[in-house]
Image (spheres, grey):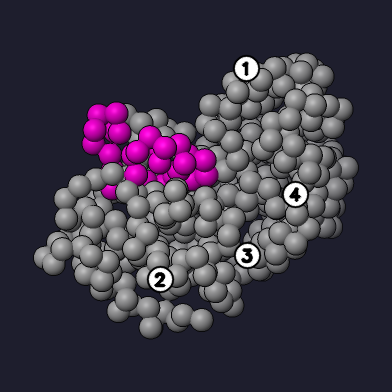
Amino acid sequence: MLRYKTFVPLVAAAGLAFGAPAGAEPTAEVLHWWTSGGEAKAVGELKNSFEAQGGTWIDSPIAGGGGDAAMTALRARVVAGNPPTAVQLKGPGIQEWAEQGALNDVEDVAEAENWNGVLPPVLAEIMKYDGKYVAAPVNIHRVDWMWANPEVLAKAGIGAMPTTWDEFNAAADKLMAAGITPLAHGGQPWQDATVFENVVLGVGGADFFRAALVDLDQEALNSPTMVAAFDQLRRMRGYVDPNFSGRDWNLATAMVMNGEAAFQIMGDWAKGEFLAAGKVPGEDFLCAPTPGNGFVLNSDSFTFFKVSGDDNIAGQKLLASLIMSPGFQETFNLAKGSIPARTDVALDKFDACAQRSHEDLLKATEANALVPSMAHEMAIPRSVRGEFLDLVTEFFNSDMSSEDAAQRLADAVKRAM
Ligand code: BGC
């Protein structure tokens, strides 16, 4: 295994080693949406490492969980002919920009560092266009997580994290009876969709998730199983507090932290928030997968846009090399709440939630139950994802029946394809 110590000189030499002209000063304008406490800490690790290697980092944060605002800003920048050097971007979005000829590749770095040998094939494929790496992955986030405040659970007499949706509902009913908000939730479309996709996995299983949310199969979309998923979502609407609308996800996490609510259903970037606030997993907060079998995959990556100039090209190569270095993957993911994208980084310093994520990832891969996140842009084009978000949010904020929701979802997806 590559160790941090052996890696540092390689990173330092990245500019020269990968054909950047001598004298170039690695520069990168980095567009991202990591602005919450935990996120800012994690991206700060990247900035510091880049600067420690002599790079100039120009920070372009666009606030807004889930990255929808950042993606709008990115489009405007590219249309204006002024793209950032590197952009937090993922899934099919990488392919869409590559098809438009908007990206530079970093294949020389990837080849010299044997990225193919250290990345899970499913991630490697997402990072490549035309056989060449155009993006570098920083992590593996799991979306199907549930976070809880143990003291609050104890107050309502709940001894363990729920393992089925029936158990979840029973626990939530007990909390309601005790006058405690069961579910901390932020009413923003991407957060509604995050809860929805986890429920779809739990109610329908991985094959159903794939059929409906990845392959966009009409029969699956408008099926009794989808109706059952909407029924569960409807029930959960009753478990959120009256002020949920528009709330940022990290404020929902804070509600769990402060004992104002019992649970939050959110990817493990929420763990980054707990950790940034000095909370200890297993003591101050609990983690458990949402009920169901599988693993909803979300991976952040930086994609390299078509910039020119020796300094910018050197910046892209240095950033690519740095992002994939084992030492950085460890430091970054300890702060971010995720696990490394590289398969050869030891996890001894990671907590029990991260260990569980890694074990379940391996199990789900084996069982063909690893599914890409729809809500977090790993599965389907943005335009179709938009239809899911609109419909799920409308459902959550109205009295639409589950049958109508399934029918309307199927129709909207058909129109968008
Ligand atoms: C990203 C995470 C981020 C979260 C909230 C997700 O789509 O993958 O890195 O922390 O959105 O902003």
Query: Does residue 270 show up magenta in the picture?
Result: no
Q: Amino acid at mark 2?
A: Glu
Q: Nearer the viewer, mark 2 or mark 4?
A: 2
Q: Which residues are magenta?
A: 77-103
Disc 3 vs disc 2: Cβ atoms closer than 8 Å? no
The one nearer the camera, 34 or 324, is 324
Residue under label 1:
415
Which one is earlier in the sequence, the residue at label 3 or at label 2?
A: 2
Q: Amino acid at mark 3?
A: Ala
Residue under label 4:
290
On the picture, is 347 further left or further right than 87?
right
Residue at 59%, 21% in the rendered image: 416
Which one is earlier in the sequence, the residue at label 4 or at label 1?
A: 4
Disc 3 vs disc 1: Cβ atoms closer than 8 Å? no
Disc 2 vs disc 1: Cβ atoms closer than 8 Å? no
Q: Residue 354 got which mark?
A: 3
Q: Nearer the viewer, mark 3 or mark 2?
A: 2
Q: Nearer the viewer, mark 3 or mark 1?
A: 1
Inter-mark Cα distance, 4 to 3: 15 Å
Residue at 34%, 44% in the rendered image: 103
Which one is earlier in the sequence, the residue at label 2 or at label 1?
A: 2
Q: Nearer the viewer, mark 4 or mark 1?
A: 1
Residue under label 2:
113
152 vs 247: above or below: below
